[in-house]
Image: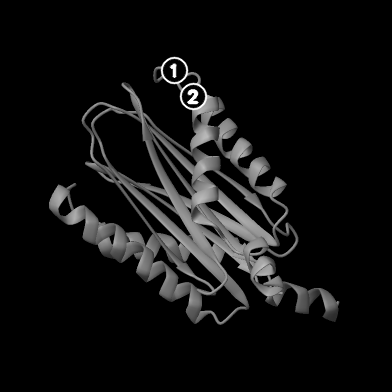
Amino acid sequence: MDDYQTEEETAFIVEEVSKIIKESVEAAIGGNAYQHSRVNQWSTSVVEQCLSQLSKLGKPFKYIVTCIIMQKNGAGLQTASTCFWDNSTDGSCAVRWENKSMYCIVSVFGLAI
Amino acid sequence: MEEFHNGNEGSFNQEEVDNSIKECIESVVGGDDYSQSLVNKWTAGIVERCLTQLVKQGKPYKYIVTCAVMQKTGAGLHTANSCYWDTTMDGSCTVRWENRTMYCVVSVFAVAIA
């Protein structure tokens, strides 16, 4: 029982991270329309908010957060990622969010220390 | 002097990785026009190639490679990264490439293994 608890505290939990990402995106850009002059500030704010929430979890992980914001105008966008790490301890989570004028794709990678 | 040299061997060489990424992109999509049916294969091909090149260097690192390919239609695209790691040992490199019909943004993150 004790061992199980410890594992939970030090594992990369996708659901938990996914929730953090969704909240950060909503807080930073929810309800806004794409604006070229503000998108720089928005993407920075999304990654910073995600990162600070993640570090608050207090788990022994290094994190990498990436955010892509794209204006909706019919263009095709494809993203891919590949990782060379320890499958048993590391993990990733990607969330796709959209509103009427833009798409936002956030990926979080967690690497165990 | 010697200690400094040893430190460098285990660290992230940004220029080398930058060149390596450019070569990988060129070899997969250089000269092609954006094609919806092929883009999936391209992004997978680019990340795999980059990763293989990086691992060949044999350094004590874990790697994450991401690639975004976007069709040129005038849409705005903005990307941002933030990392919570050891700033003395870990590093990243982002390369922006384009041709007549598409943009390609590749990022490599290298995290030192303790």
Q: Is disc 2 in contact with disc 1, using a CB cutoff of under 8 Å?
A: yes
Quarter the C terminus of chain A occupies:
bottom right
The residue located at (71%, 46%) in the rendering is A56
Quarter the N terminus of chain A occupies:
bottom right
Dot 2 falls on a residue whose secondary structure is helix
User: Height in image: A106 above or below B41?
Assistant: above
Please name whichever residue, A8 or A12, is drawn nearer the observer in this view of the structure: A8
| Left or right of A80 on screen, residue A87 | right
Residue B7 visible to an observer of this rendering: yes
Q: Which residue is mark 2?
A: A29
The residue located at (64%, 47%) in the rendering is A54
Amino acid type at circle 1 is: Asn
Residue A113 visible to an observer of this rendering: no
The residue located at (51%, 42%) in the rendering is A19
Amino acid type at circle 2 is: Ile
Q: Which residue is mark 1?
A: A32
Please name whichever residue, A113 or B87, is drawn nearer the observer in this view of the structure: A113
